[in-house]
Image (spheres, helix red, strand yellow):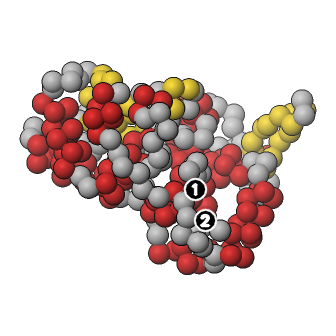
């Protein structure tokens, strides 16, 4: 109803939920915002050779329901299909989809049915998930001074040239681009009522962090569950500007792993 009448909602949803509204596939990176520990375990499987580790994994997901251990087949016959180095990406993809939908399938379906009755979901297909959040939640004025005051650094210092360039670049952005940057590094375009000092991560209060990671030819990456931007040591302002502009314009972002 808010969208139909041109009103905004404050709290909004997670970015993966907006992707579901657009019938887009949930990616591994998306689950980081929902369950960091689960995401890290899947990243370990992705980054290591399953055959060499001799792990006995099958296409099933174990979970606890009312104190009882349950098993869910990720695909027909999953209890008899071993996870190998050759099929582990399919296993990860199915596990991500299951984790996001677990226990909320009926509620999600009911929400989409109700939403579609007042505003056809097909009308939203012209947007990506970040644009959809801006459409539903509106665009705040981002206070760059407050943002900069409430930022911490790893392997950089406030006076590092890359940090100085970063804030110079942020100040040159219009409000829409700043909102897109905020989405890229925190997972949402909304700033807490109390400002950037009250940013929350997956485990509680978490200030925005800029960390020096990678080489100058690398692209920036984000970790939305930690409100962290991995910023390579670029050699010039123009190089930094080009890389960051590319990052915030991409729907999936370069935070994908």
Q: Quadrant of residue 139?
A: bottom left
Q: Nearer the viewer, residue 96 or 153?
A: 153
- Label 2, secondary structure: give it: loop
**Residue position for label 2:** 2
Residue 201 to residue 93: above or below: above
Quarter of the figure with residue 158: top left
- Mark seen at residue 17: none
**C-alpha gap between disc 1 and disc 2:** 7 Å
Using the image, determine if residue 232 lies above or below residue 103: above
Q: Which mark is residue 9?
A: 1
Q: Nearer the viewer, residue 145 or 124?
A: 145
Place of residue 116 in the rendered image (x, y in percent of width and height, measured from the top left):
68, 74
Relative to the observer, which residue lies in front, 9 or 158?
9
Q: From where the camera sits, is residue 232 visible?
A: yes
Labels 1 and 2 touching (C-beta < 8 A): yes
Residue 72 picture location, percent across and down: 80, 46
Residue in the image at 68% along x and 76% along y: 118
Number of residues whose C-alpha sits closer than 10 Å to that of mark 1, classed few (under 14), some (14–19) or many (20 or more): some
Identify the mark nearer the N-term, 1 or 2: 2
């Amino acid at each position: 109803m808010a969208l139909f009448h041109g009103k905004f909602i404050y709290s909004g949803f997670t970015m993966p939920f907006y992707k579901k509204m657009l019938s887009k596939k949930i990616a591994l990176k998306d689950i980081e915002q929902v369950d960091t520990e689960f995401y890290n375990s899947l990243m370990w499987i992705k980054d290591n050779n399953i055959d060499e580790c001799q792990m006995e994994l099958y296409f099933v997901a174990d979970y606890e329901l009312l104190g009882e251990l349950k098993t869910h087949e990720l695909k027909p016959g999953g209890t008899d299909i071993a996870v190998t180095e050759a099929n582990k990406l399919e296993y990860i993809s199915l596990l991500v989809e299951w984790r996001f939908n677990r226990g909320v399938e009926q509620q999600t379906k009911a929400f989409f049915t109700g939403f579609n009755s007042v505003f056809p979901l097909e009308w939203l297909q012209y947007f990506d998930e970040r644009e959809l959040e801006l459409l539903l939640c509106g665009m705040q004025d981002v206070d760059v001074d407050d943002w900069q005051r409430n930022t911490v650094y790893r392997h950089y210092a406030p006076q590092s040239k890359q940090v100085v360039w970063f804030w110079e670049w942020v100040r040159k952005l219009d409000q829409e681009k700043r909102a897109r940057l905020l989405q890229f590094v925190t997972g949402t375009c909304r700033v807490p009522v109390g400002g950037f000092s009250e940013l929350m991560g997956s485990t509680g209060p978490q200030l925005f962090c800029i960390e020096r990671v990678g080489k100058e030819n690398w692209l920036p990456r984000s970790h939305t569950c930690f409100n962290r931007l991995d910023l390579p040591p670029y050699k010039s302002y123009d190089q930094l500007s080009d890389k960051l502009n590319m990052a915030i314009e991409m729907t999936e972002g370069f935070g994908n792993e």
